[in-house]
């Protein structure tokens, strides 16, 4: 173990011991004050500054908006907020370094696919929140869909606060409607990866300055499997009857998809730098893209169109499936190194229950970045380009103002969408990789070497797929799968699956 890791473990153990002692004695400065008592405390105490790390392309006006946020939170809970944004493709790696080095932080965005929630909870990166939730989070417990809090438990405990949003995960093909209209392109029969080829060909032949198929290095072709760990090659088929975990790279569905992706790459439909691109936000801002793939929610087209300033439409690329990835798709954890865990929970409670705060964090400063149309609807102003945030990652979505074209029953449509989602066969199964930690590290290294270049079509799967499969096996993937299978079999028996 490295010196930095020993130091982190020692700090973590010390902090946990302090939290236990303080909670047993009722003894922190804030222990006897409820979530609404911060204003009174603010009269006699210095405000606490909370450092919040979150995912997304860093925005020009983030500090400006956080100044306004801090004025509000200082009055409400005697805390100010510093937000640090890390770009999409860099987030997991940089946060791993930040946590291991003991970088000061209080609140951390985490998810199944971005700075892995379950694995990092088990490694001790996040505080266990059960007691903090009871003491400072009762309001949010009464607000968030119970399925999120239950589905995000790790070994029976909460380590983060999930965003109250869409529950199922449904993939869609998104299109810049400007080009659909210009070339009178029909998307009514678009569904599979193969079905998009004629559309891409049209754009490539007629729009030399436009990226036909936009993607970053996190792109993975959709196949009907649920991953044991997001973006590692271990998965169970969605219609499984035997619950067998397979190497996704060895499945005919993924092999067909990778061959298609390489075909599209060679045809020039995919940007040459796709495998190393951290974000496509520049393309979205300029409008110089034709299509991509995204996860949807009810009325998502309105949200995307309002954000980008031009019409975006979509059509399904998958069914709506409730998976661990979707339940754990957006979580805010409290760092194990936080110096202010009680205040961090007060902030998360406020963020998830207070519409004024939630909309300020999401949309910026009223009159600068957006304007209200009526009590529930708003529209972006020109300055919104300097504060264009990923709404899903910032807390309770069902507190947000509606876009100009959204119907009044938008959030009722969300509830209906959530109720109609189909459960993945392995929903709520969380693999514990402790016994194969060495192999997991080696598998992750192989993934970094091959994954993005294969998934984006950058390299020829005829040559590189056998190499990747061989390297994964040498790294110990079969042992990891065997351990995961044993745990899944035990979970299946315990849950009568």
Image: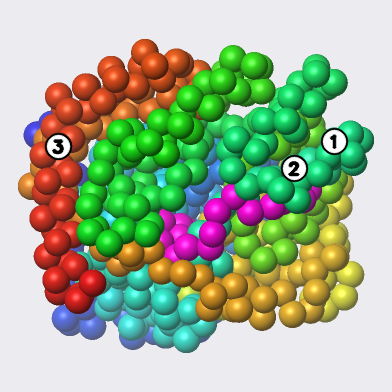
Left or right position of 259 against 373: left
Q: Can you say which quadrant of the picture contains the N terminus? A: top left
Q: Is 320 covered by the magenta stretch?
A: yes
Q: CA distance from mark 2 to mark 3?
A: 39 Å
Q: CA distance from mark 1 to mark 2?
A: 8 Å
Circle 3 — which element?
Answer: helix
Q: Is residue 161 above or below residue 473?
A: below
Q: Is residue 494 above or below residue 79?
A: below
Percent position of residue 304, x then y? 73, 52
Mark 1 vs 2: CB contact within 8 A: yes
Q: Tell me which residue sits at (34%, 37%) in the image.
A: 251
**Quadrant in which residue 379 is drawn:** bottom right
Left or right position of 83 against 25: right
To which residue does mark 1 refer?
179
Q: Is residue 497 above or below residue 429?
A: below
What range of the chain is rendered magenta?
312-334
Q: How is the image coloured?
A: rainbow
Percent position of residue 412, x then y? 66, 80
Q: Can you say which quadrant of the picture contains the C terminus? A: bottom left
Q: Which mark is residue 453?
A: none
> Within 10 Å of the Cα at label 3, are there few (<14), some (14-19), or many (20+) other Cα atoms?
some
> Within 10 Å of the Cα at label 1, are there few (<14), some (14-19), or many (20+) other Cα atoms?
some
To which residue does mark 3 refer?
478
| Dot placed on the residue nearer the N-terminal end, 1 or 3 | 1
Q: CA distance from mark 1 to mark 3?
A: 46 Å
Percent position of residue 481, x then y? 17, 44
Q: Tell me which residue sits at (69%, 52%) in the image.
A: 315
Circle 1 — which element?
Answer: helix
Left or right position of 469 against 364: left
Q: Which mark is residue 175?
A: 2
Q: 493 or 176: nearer the eye?
A: 493
Residue 454 in view in this figure = yes
């Amino acid at each position: 173990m490295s010196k930095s890791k020993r130091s982190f473990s020692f700090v973590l153990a010390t902090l946990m011991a302090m939290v236990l002692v303080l909670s047993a004695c009722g003894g922190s400065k804030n222990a006897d004050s409820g979530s609404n008592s911060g204003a009174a405390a603010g009269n006699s105490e210095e405000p606490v500054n909370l450092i919040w790390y979150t995912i997304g392309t860093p925005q020009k006006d983030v500090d400006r908006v956080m100044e306004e946020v801090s004025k509000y939170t200082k009055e409400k809970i005697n805390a100010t907020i510093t937000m640090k944004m890390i770009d999409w493709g860099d987030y997991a790696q940089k946060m791993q370094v930040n946590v291991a080095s003991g970088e000061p932080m209080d609140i951390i965005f985490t998810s199944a696919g971005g700075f892995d929630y379950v694995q990092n909870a088990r490694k001790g990166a996040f505080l266990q929140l059960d007691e903090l939730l009871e003491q400072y989070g009762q309001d949010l417990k009464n607000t968030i869909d119970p399925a999120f809090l239950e589905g995000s438990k790790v070994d029976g405990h909460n380590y983060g606060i999930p965003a109250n949003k869409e529950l199922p995960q449904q993939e869609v093909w998104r299109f810049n409607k400007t080009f659909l209209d210009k070339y009178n392109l029909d998307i009514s029969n678009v569904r599979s990866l193969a079905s998009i080829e004629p559309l891409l060909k049209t754009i490539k032949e007629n729009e030399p300055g436009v990226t036909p198929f936009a993607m970053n290095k996190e792109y993975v072709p959709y196949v009907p499997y649920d991953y044991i760990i997001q973006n590692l090659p271990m998965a169970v088929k969605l219609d499984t009857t035997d619950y067998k975990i397979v190497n996704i790279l060895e499945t005919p569905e993924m092999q067909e998809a990778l061959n298609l992706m390489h075909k599209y790459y060679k045809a020039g439909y995919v940007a040459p730098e796709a495998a190393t691109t951290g974000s496509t936000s520049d393309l979205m801002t300029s409008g110089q893209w034709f299509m991509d793939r995204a996860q949807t929610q009810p009325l998502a087209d309105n949200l995307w169109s309002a954000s980008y300033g031009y019409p975006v439409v979509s059509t399904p690329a998958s069914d709506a499936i409730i998976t661990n990835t979707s339940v754990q798709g957006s979580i805010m954890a409290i760092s194990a190194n936080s110096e202010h865990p009680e205040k961090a929970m007060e902030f998360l409670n406020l963020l998830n229950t207070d519409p004024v705060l939630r909309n300020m964090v999401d949309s910026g400063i009223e009159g600068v970045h957006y304007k209200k149309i009526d009590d529930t609807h708003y529209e972006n102003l020109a300055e919104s380009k300097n504060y264009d945030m990923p709404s899903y990652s910032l807390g309770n979505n069902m507190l947000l103002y509606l876009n100009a074209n959204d119907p009044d029953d938008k959030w009722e449509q969300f509830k209906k969408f959530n109720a109609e989602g189909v459960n993945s066969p392995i929903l709520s199964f969380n693999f514990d990789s402790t016994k194969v930690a060495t192999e997991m590290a080696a598998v992750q290294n192989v993934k970094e070497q091959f994954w993005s270049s294969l998934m984006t079509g950058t390299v020829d799967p005829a040559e590189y797929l056998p190499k990747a499969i061989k390297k994964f096996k040498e790294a110990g993937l079969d042992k990891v799968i065997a351990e995961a299978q044993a745990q899944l079999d035990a979970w299946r028996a315990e849950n009568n699956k």
